[in-house]
Image (cartoon, helix red, strand yellow):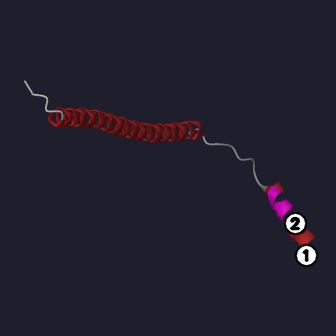
Amino acid sequence: MKSQHINKILEEFDALENISPSESWDLVFQKKLHATRLSKSNTIIKINTLMLILVTLNIAYIWNTVTNDKLEVNENRGFNLETISNELLIPQN
């Protein structure tokens, strides 16, 4: 049964006519390739933009943290110096 089925399929295959592409096949194929490239390009641009935004946010956060730490150190130092001067009874000018 299998060999008859295989022989029938092979006969159908042999009976097929030669297939040739249409005249506009190359043009249609080029359009599809171009559309795919544009789509891929747009995706890469979106990913790059997102990464740039994330990096910028991280830099801004780090800058803000460093700046606030410096301000707190300066405020704490001034407060500490004032406390020391008050404790040692140093007159302030």
Residue pointed to by mark 1: 1
Q: As rendered, which of 89 and 41 lies closer to the eye? A: 89
- Left or right, residue 20 beside residue 91: right
Residue at image x 36%, y 39%? 53
Decide which of 63, 87 is in the foreground and name it. 87
Name the amino acid type tagged 2: Ile
Is residue 11 one of those drawn in magenta?
yes
Q: Residue 11 vs residue 83: left or right?
A: right
**Residue under the image location 22 percent in, 36 percent down:** 80
Q: Is residue 23 left or right of residue 62?
A: right
Could you say whether the residue bearing mark 2 is in a helix, strand or loop?
Answer: helix
Percent coordinates x, y for residue 79 in the rendering: 19, 37
Position in image of residue 60 (x %, y %): 32, 36
Q: Callout 2 environment at 10 Å: few (<14), some (14 to 19), or many (20+)?
A: few
Identify the main secondary structure in magenta.
Answer: helix
Rate crowding at label 1 as few (under 14), some (14 to 19) or many (20 or more) other CA atoms within 10 Å.
Answer: few
Q: Quadrant of the N terminus?
A: bottom right
Q: Quadrant of residue 63?
A: top left
Residue sitting at the far bottom: 1
User: Which residue occupies 85% across, 60% down?
Assistant: 10
Query: Residue visible at 59% across and 40% down?
Result: 25
Q: Which disc number belongs to residue 6? A: 2
Span shown in magenta: 9-13
**Residue furthest top in the image:** 93
* Residue 32, image x, y percentages: 53, 41
- Amino acid type of the residue that numbered disc 1 sits on in the rendered structure: Met
Left or right of 76: which side holds 86?
left
